[in-house]
Each structure stands twice: as C-alpha cells, then as structure tokens.
Amino acid sequence: MTRLLQVVWGLGPLAFGWLVLDVSRAAPGGQLGIRAIAAETLIFAAWSGGLVAVIRLRPTYLVYVRVASGSAAAWGGAGVAGGFEAGAITLGWGLITLILSFSPQVTIEAAARDSAPRERRFPLALPAGLLVFMVVPSALVAGTGIGFIPAWLLGARPTGPRLLLTVIALVASPVIVVSLSRLARRWLVVVPSGIVLHDPMLLAETYRLTPDEIAWVEFAPEKWRRVAIGEKVADATAGCATRPLIIVLGKPMPGPMLRPRRSNGSGVVDMIACRPVNRTDALATLRSAGYERPSVEEGAVNG
C-alpha cells in the first residue's frame, strides 16, 4: 500500500496540472501574471514536499501528506463547482491519496520507520466511525483552509456561504493540524525496559510499565467490556469495538492518566486494554519478549 501511495502521489502533476493551468489562464493577468506564477510555484512546491514525505514516510510527514491531499481534494471540488472539467481529476486524485494515507498498512510502516533501535512501535487504532466521519473530513477542512492561499493569489474571492466556509476552514486549520499530528503519534511501544503507551490524544502523559510490573499480555475475551465490569480495567482503546490486547499487571497499580487529568475509576487498575492496528503482530512481539501467559503447569510449580 505504501508503494501504491508513492506511485499515485508521483502522478500528481498529471492529476492537478491541467486544473492549475486552466485556473491560471482565467486569473487576472493570465498564466504569466505574477500572482499566477506565485500560485503555481506554491502548488508544485507543496507537491514536491509531499513527494519527499511519501518516500521517507514518517508519522510527521504523513500528516503533511494528509493535509496536502485534503488541499488537492478541496481544490478539485472548487474547480468542479467553478466549471473547470479538470477539477474532477484533481478531486479524485486528492481523495485517493487521502484514503491511502490513512490506510492501516501505511500507518504501520510509518511508525516502524520512526522506531528507535531495539524498539517496536505499533500504532493504536481508531474506531472506524471516528476515522471516516471526523478524522478524514478534518483533513479536508484543514486542506481547504491552507489551499485557499494559492486560490486567493489566482483571484478567488468567495462570497456568501463560501466565504463563511473559507473563514471557518482558515481558522480551524492550525487546530486540526495539531490534532492530526497527535493522532499520528499514538503507539504501543515494546522496548527492552518494558512497555510504553504513548497517546497524546487520550492520555495526559506517556504511560510506562517495567517487565516486573507486567504479568502477561493476551487478547481480551469476547464482549470484554461486559466481562470486565468487576475488574479494574484502564480502557485505552479510544472506543474501538474489536477485541483489544489486555495487559495484565502483576499487582494493582495506578493506571494511565486520561485527558483531562483524571484517573480511571479509583486510580488503581489490574489490567490495561489497548488496541494496536496490527494487534496480532503486536501480541507475537510481546510474547517473544516474555510477556506470555504462564501455563497451568508453570503456575503450579511457581505456586
């Protein structure tokens, strides 16, 4: 999937080039006007930055790609609304790159490339509804706000509802970019010194567990929320409905601090639930690190 994103992004000039030329010709002063040249330079510089980002592929670079894709989709949509036929191609290209940039495979590889030596990073999943109806549209809104800069250079002067939407997008863009950056840095990290939960969206601070504090890690049972009512479980799944991993602690201890700064329940938990995107791979890595549930025979001997 990463290779596909790189190929599709590389085709960008073919996808949005005609729209840029058509809009430039219609701009005051024509294609060779100072504003048109400045807008074209900004657009192709943004695409070039995205090309470097998809090749190097780190979580921070992925945020850039997502916002730039949102800008392209917004540009394409505005082009279609303005009567430019090439806008449909730009709109399709922007939406395709945006969807690819949020794909699990791309997210997993970006986290893996950003890992330090002797550590494994597993990105944490988001509920599908939240991703489809909030996160992806947020990238489109941020892209709309940022993409208005070259549009303004080309003579775009929205009025009425379009002006209101543009102002909202411009004001919201910085906040959305910060939120997208936090979403791109949500990890379960396995290191020699234990396990780290890093989730700037959900947790007030990074949560660390040493090997001595961990009993074992396993998949949660079906309907685990209902089963775990009597247990003190810290829910760090962000609401994902699918079965998470359960980190069983060796003894009750303070759980992660959620945003805003408040503990889970009484503040002391027995287990922590989290949902990596690639949960099977994460469980295999944790078991190979020694966090496997002891067998009945081992428990009897240790007892």
Image (tube, helix red, strand yellow):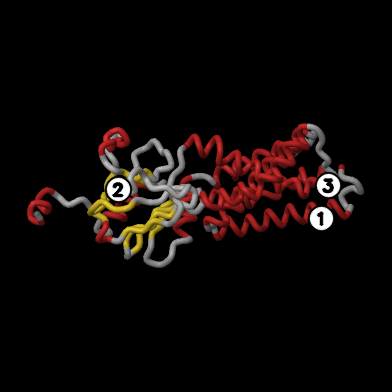
Write the residue at 40% across / 43% down: 237
Judged left or right of residue 42, residue 236 is left
Judged left or right of residue 2, residue 241 is left
Q: Which mark is residue 121?
A: none
**Would you name the residue on which mark 1 appears?**
38
Image x and y of residue 88, in percent: 71, 36
* Front label number (2 vs 1): 2
Q: Disc 2 to disc 1, how far (Cα)?
A: 57 Å
**Would you name the residue on which mark 3 appears?**
154
**Would you name the residue on which mark 2 appears?**
269
Disc tally is 3
What amino acid is found at the position of numbered circle 3 in the picture? Leu
What amino acid is found at the position of numbered circle 2 in the picture? Val
Image x and y of residue 157, in percent: 83, 40
Image x and y of residue 180, in percent: 56, 49
Query: Which secondary structure, mark 1?
Result: helix
Task: Give whichever of discs 3 and 2 has the lower sequence position.
Answer: 3
Question: Is residue 104 visible to the viewer in this orientation of the structure?
Answer: yes
Other-residue count near label 2 (Cα within 10 Å), few / some / many at <14 / 14–19 / ≥20: many
Q: Disc 3 to disc 2, how far (Cα)?
A: 58 Å
Query: Which secondary structure, mark 2?
Result: strand
Quarter occupied by residue 83: top right
Write the residue at 24% across / 58% down: 290
Image x and y of residue 29, in percent: 92, 48
Other-residue count near label 1 (Cα within 10 Å), few / some / many at <14 / 14–19 / ≥20: some
